[in-house]
Amino acid sequence: MASRPPNGRVLQVAVLVELDSSWGRSVVSGVGDFAANFGPWNLLFDQADDSEGRSAPEQFHGDGVIARISTPIQLEKLVAADLPTVNVDDMFSAVPGIGYVLTDERARAEMALEHFIQRGFRNFAFFAPPSHEYSRTREQAFVDAVEASGARCHVYRPGYRTGRRIRREEMHNRTLRWLRSVPRPAAILAVDARRARQLSEICSVEGISVPDDVAILAGDNDDLLCSLSTPPLSSIEVASRQIGYDAAAMLLQMINTGKSPGEPVRLPPICVSSKQSTDVLAIDDEMIIRAIRFIQAHAFQGIVVADILKEVPVSRRYLELQFRRYLGRLPAEEIRRLRLDRGKELLAQTDMSVDAIAEACGYAGATQFGVAFRKRFGSTPLSFRKYLRQGGGADAAPRSDA
């Protein structure tokens, strides 16, 4: 449980997180939300140094630091400063004395894989050029999830070390050779929105159709990059604002107790924001494609399986067998999944009432919607919204089984 700063004084906190991405701005907004509720805090921001990463000025002698630690020099400086520090990135993990609030990579990988499987894909790949900006944790989590499903994950291995600068043309050619080696139709998870856009641009130049030949999903979201890509990019919405909020709560606890947490806090992503880059069905049964498209078009209008059978001239048994084969679920379960995922997204991104959301998702009322939502996500709709808006701590995180 959060408490006020000791003696009611103003805490001096350095926030060393980039502000040039949607993710970074959202994390910092979460820190600001917590500071406004449990302050007073004075937040210090600093620009990055290309070689050292973001670090507080030499003269900073404040109370604590919230950082995205991205370089060995930055880590060395923060350790030497001997201030309570919370890291919101896993590039350098399990450093003694440092707290961690992170996205749950296993949950992100499973969400990405489920998104692809729902569209009938059987060929999977992961794209992440070597970089200081991220660890290989996201890659390994996706590889593990794909292999656990019985499939193979084709990982981009360009053969050059992290940090080496290569020309744009060379990067293009290396990526193209890799793309040609991946079986199609392929579902590719890119490590982040910037690399997803890079991949999409190469496909466009080389005449590789997105999403028909290659479906691209960004591992995180950048509103501008994803919306301006051609086609617009699907992405995973992570709980970045909550990461910032919980990081601030953890930092205050460290300041008050003088102790660092024993385990990192890992927050599940919120949902997949589905756009045109993954809007395809890699299924070779035309009747099932028609059935899925009908569900996607009418799921929020209160349809039942009987309505699908009026549209698609097959037996109910055949429909259910083929749905299990391609999607791993029954038609009724697919309708319910789409409704609840939309409800989750509306709770996260709008101020609509639960009654209005229930109606928008095709439910008879808020009670029916609430029962179904809690059964799937382990939380009531209002508790989920409250959690996202910093009403609950990290220990109250709703279960994610998307």
Image: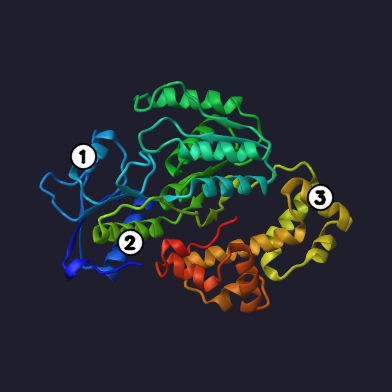
**Which residue is under mark 3?**
287
Q: Tell me how far mark 1 sits from mark 2, CA to CA.
A: 23 Å
Q: Do tag 3 and tag 2 residues touch (Cβ < 8 Å)?
A: no
Give coordinates of residue 155: x percent, y percent.
54, 30
| 1 or 2: tag closer to the N-terminus | 1
Residue 89 lies in what quarter of the image? top left
The residue lying toward the viewer, choosing from 149 and 284, is 149
The 10 Å Cα crowd at callout 3, few under 14, some 14 to 19, many 20 or more, is some
Residue 284 seen anywhere in this rendered image of the structure: yes
Left of 85 or right of it: where is 171? right
Quadrant of the rendering where the C terminus is positioned: bottom right
**Which residue is under mark 2?**
249
Residue drawn 28% across and 34% down?
Answer: 72
Give coordinates of residue 55: x percent, y percent.
21, 44
Give coordinates of residue 317: x percent, y percent.
87, 55
**Which residue is under mark 1?**
77
Residue drawn 61% across and 49% down?
Answer: 115
| 3 or 1: tag closer to the N-terminus | 1
Q: What amino acid is at disc 3?
A: Met
Residue 357 lies in what quarter of the image? bottom right
Q: Tell me how far mark 3 sits from mark 1, CA to CA.
A: 61 Å
The 10 Å Cα crowd at callout 2, few under 14, some 14 to 19, many 20 or more, is many
Q: For the residue labelled by badge 1, is the local secondary structure a helix, a strand or a loop?
A: helix
| 3 or 2: tag closer to the N-terminus | 2
Left of 47 or right of it: where is 279? right
